Amino acid sequence: MSYELTGKLIAKYDTVQRTETFKTREFAVEKIDDVQGRSIVNYAKFQCVQDKTAILDKVNIGDDIKVYFNIKGSKWEKDGKTNYITNLDAWRIEQLLAPNTGNNNNAADTFEPMDNFTAEDDKDDLPF
């Protein structure tokens, strides 16, 4: 099952090579919710794995983003003690664009996918 969270990118870390064949990269998002007139601030730390570590390259600290992620959990036992570990595995990030200030009839934020594709990109010079 996939989840999503919208907030501000407040930290991103270097890629860490965990083993010869496995790498991760972490980042943190600040999410502010308005609850009965009060602003509640929450922080979520995500990780990207393998080829998804590169999705952070296109966003900057302070950007408003939408993160798509899966929740992964594992059980770890050592010396008769059991521990449970939960990870938020991000697999896509969209940069949120500010509303167009020159056009007052658009009050909602718009989403800009990181992998942009426009109609102009679809044109080719083939005669058929």
Image (tube, rainbow, N blue to C red):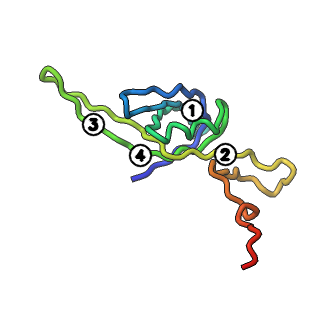
Q: SS at mark 1?
A: strand
Q: Amino acid at mark 3?
A: Ser
Please name the residue that numbered disc 2 is placed on. 96
Q: Residue at x 61, y 46 (%)?
A: 94
User: How many neighbours does mark 3 have within 10 angstroms: few (below 14), some (14-19), or many (20 or more)?
Assistant: few
Residue closer to the observer: 66 or 124: 124
Q: Is residue 59 left or right of residue 120?
A: left
Q: Residue furthest right?
A: 102
Residue closer to the observer: 48 or 34: 48
**Residue 51 rendering spot, x and y as whole percentages:** 48, 41
Q: Earlier in the sequence, mark 2 or mark 4?
A: 4
Q: Earlier in the sequence, mark 2 or mark 3?
A: 3
Q: Earlier in the sequence, mark 4 or mark 1?
A: 1
Please name the residue that numbered disc 3 is placed on. 74
Q: CA distance from mark 3 to mark 4?
A: 13 Å
Q: Indicate which disc residue 30 carries.
A: 1
Q: Are marks 2 and 4 in contact (CB under 8 Å)?
A: no
